[in-house]
Amino acid sequence: EFTHIPTSPHSIISHHPSPKPMLHMTPPLLQKLCYAGRLAKGNTIIHQVGPRSCRRRGPLSLLPILPTHQTISRRSQHNQNQHNSINELRGPTSHDLTYFRSILSQPDRSILTNLPPASASESRLTPNSQEEASHNLARYNEDWTSHYHGSSPLVLRPRSTSEVSSILRYCHDNFIGVVPQGGNTGLCGAATPFHDEIILSLEDMKTIHNLDMHSGILTCDAGCILHNLHEYANQYGYLLPLDIGSKGSCQIGGNVSTNAGGQYFFRFGGLHGTVMGLEVVLPDGRVMHLNMEIEEDEDGTIQQSSTHRKDNTGYDLKHLFIGAEGSLGMVTKVAIACPALPVSKNTTLLVCDSYKSILKVLQTAKEELGEILSAMELMDYNTLHLVQKYGCGSNDSGSRLLQDMLQSDPSTQQSECSRPLFLLVETQGSNSDHDTSKMDSFLTRLYDCNLISNGFLAQDTKQMMEMWSIRESCNPSVARAGCVYKFDVSIPIEDYMDVAWEVERKLLAFMEPSDLAVCVWGHIADGNAHINIVTPGQYEKDSALAKRIETMVYDSVLKRRGSISAEHGLGQSKNEYLGQIKEKSVLDVMTTMKALFDPHGIMNPGKYLPRSNTK
């Protein structure tokens, strides 16, 4: 229960040891929460993976650059003898299934398909019924938002880089489309087949190879779950610098391939700065080790690996694959630099009456918290109202916190500018007394300047987790409320809320307020806003409305010189806009790069680049 405390506003600087009951200082005072075998070296060394007698190493031989006007067409039926040009892609057949079964070490586990067996002998090797197989395929053919659906009849789950190489080399030679897939938590359809391409999932490549205790560089397979990497690094005194809401199911290879940002982007920077090395399989099966030295034994187990923080020997090619969404090749191993695990953390939730106050709080945080400021997450009133309704349970402390934050009746909030805004601020440092003093100074200054109307300060790890659970409940809560039209954009910080407010006004011109909820949350410190337009109680996507909303949002973003993709990528939802927002010279170079690495166009066809530029 909250207890009223008649004290001065400056009492916020006194900290009490946990556990204590919840203490509540009514506005304008702050509220404190008191819950209780081979060596591959260098940037450009490549070897062909296959039978050991056939493996070779050598410099990257350039593939022919294709004319950008060549067409990639689709064929529903396979004819093994008809490959007259590189223009044709096809889906997999039972004949292909026979080959994949021959090169995979555990075919019964690694192959998921509803294709008919090529022979009676193979029929005995396929224990699952067609109906069961189709049911199991469904989760790979649909994205997290349920907006994108594919019809792939075949999922391959290789267990090694060698198997990935053999698969891609075969698909390259036979013009079979391939869709790389990680944890399938993306929001732009990048990991969902367009048609009947093979889905290449790395979920069985999940070995954490080592963490260099001196450099802090962690090396792992691309299929490792992000949360597992956090736990592994933590036990050795390190912190994985990437943290996102889907960390319980997303994979590090997918994070790298979409250049995921997350809440600690402001503190640690993006993956272009923290990824030190990559192992990548090219579409023709060749393997590149980019600033990653690997020594394996005879069965392919890594005995030793090495990655350098500094390596200035040639083009830094790994950056081409960070954020490329599998369009140039398949990331199979990642080396990422981890900072030391912080000794001290402080987390506070603040309530502001206006966005003008939010901007002042942001500046004050930079001035007062400085080097220990790690995250600033903004959530608007509509978002937390849905979190309260669909997210936190009715009896937990997170729900009680929400009740105190959302004191006003939503029906009285007539103007978007009059609704309160909420800010989660976290610090991480190495000295508890020093960091606590800085947080106290920050909060005192906010109160003295009347920048906040309410606030909560966590007193232990449990409270911090409950605060973060509110933030991480935003996405699943709006999904439970109705159909969600999602947008991940970068906006100049000064105009951060203006896009959502402008879109809301336009939508209310032809929609009833009860049929609409425009929700905003995101990483305010770097200008990344997640704008979610929800139709409460209506769970079917309205294609006409979706297109109308999309035009409104992107027009509003672009006129403010923002970006239509901040951290979720392009996939098949935004790729067609590149022709409108990129200079022709830039798009021409991108198209040339695609043709260089993937001349047959097998990698993630129909994604990333505009389809007109990959023909």
Image (cartoon, helix red, strand yellow):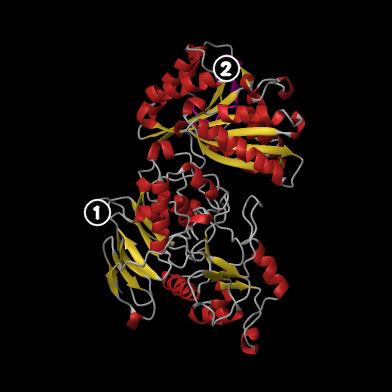
Placement of 384 over or under 612, stated as above or below: above
Q: Is mark 1 on a helix, strand or loop?
A: loop
Residue sitting at x 33%, y 56%: 317
Q: Which amino acid does label 1 sit on?
A: Asp
Looking at the image, which is closer to me, 366 or 60?
60
Q: Name the residue under label 1.
A: 311
Q: Which amino acid does label 2 sit on?
A: Ser
Q: How far is mark 1 from mark 2, CA to CA?
A: 50 Å
Query: Which is closer to the viewer, label 1 or label 2?
Result: 1
Q: In which quarter of the image is residue 270?
A: top left
What crowding class fits label 2: few (fewer than 14 Cα within 10 Å), some (14-19), or many (20 or more)?
some
Q: Which mark is residue 358?
A: none
Residue 233 can be seen in this image: yes
State the count of labels: 2
On screen, residue 538 versus residue 268, left or right, reads right
Q: Give the range drawn in magenta.
A: 17-30
Q: Name the residue under label 2.
A: 453
What crowding class fits label 1: few (fewer than 14 Cα within 10 Å), some (14-19), or many (20 or more)?
some
Q: Which percent across, then down, holds residue 95?
A: 58, 82
Q: Quadrant of residue 23?
A: top right
